[in-house]
Image (cartoon, rainbow, N blue to C red):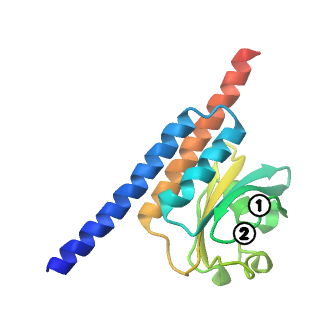
Amino acid sequence: MGDTFSGDYSKDKALAARWSSAAEAIEALAGARSLDAVVSVLRAFARRAVGADGIAVVLRDGDQCHYVAEDAMEPLWEGQYFPAAHCVSGWAMEHRRTAVIDDIFDDQRVPIDAYSTTFVRSMLMVPIGQAEPIAAIGAYWSETGQPTDNEIALLEALARAASVALENERLSRRMER
């Protein structure tokens, strides 16, 4: 019984640390006044907050997905463009909902050629921007498996905070004009 309690305490402590990291990110996003600042905050906090092996921030650029930033255990696709119709980030933005993929080799939304040479085996992709997503944030794990409800909730909370930050930035520009 002592081992179970100790294990539960360690899990609770790790989860509390993730939510604390997410809270820091949300506070930093509240002060972000540009797209670059939002991307920088997500790059700095998202991976730690969700406990992922990597994250990427993806911007919609016409009919392309531009991987503008990442923090990962190995390089992924930073700086590269992919057709939005053939990438998970494009799918998440188009459908305005989170893509939860527990095995990249078993999901038709995943362009296997782009992923097969990476460490990625499972992932989440969350759109940023409710009415009209302009970006997405992805979290990647090196093992297959369903992301936990907490991991999903944490990444979605960060995406909502980023969406609010970008909307605030847009409104500030409009008021300055």
Question: Which residue is found at the position 71% from the left and 78% from the top?
Answer: 118
Disc 2 to disc 1, C-alpha distance: 7 Å
What residue is drawn where x is 64% and y is 48%? 128
Of 13 and 156, nearer the camera is: 13
Q: Amino acid at mark 2?
A: Pro
SS of the residue at dot 2? loop
Compared to residue 158, the image places residue 107 above or below, namely: below
Q: Is residue 95 left or right of residue 111?
A: left
The location of residue 24, given as percent across then percent down, is 47, 44
Task: Name, please, the residue furthest toward the left.
Answer: 1
**Quarter that holds the C terminus:** top right
Q: Position of residue 49 (x, y in %)?
A: 48, 57
Q: Position of residue 12 (x, y in %)?
A: 30, 63
Report whether residue 39 is seen. yes
Residues tagged 2 and 1 counted as in contact (Cβ below 8 A): yes
Label disc, if present, on residue 78 of the rendered structure: 1
Q: Which residue is mark 2?
A: 75
Question: For the residue carrying disc 1, how many other residues have a C-alpha within 10 Å: few (<14), some (14-19), or many (20+)?
Answer: some
In the rendered image, which quarter is residue 122 located in? bottom right
Count of numbered marks: 2
Amino acid type of the residue that numbered disc 1 sits on in the rendered structure: Glu
Task: Tell me the quadrant of the picture where the N terminus can be found.
Answer: bottom left
User: Toward the viewer: 147 or 96?
Assistant: 147
Q: Quadrant of residue 31?
A: top right
Label 2 crowd bin: few (<14), some (14–19), many (20+), radius 10 Å: few
**Relative to residue 169, is residue 51 depicted above or below?**
below
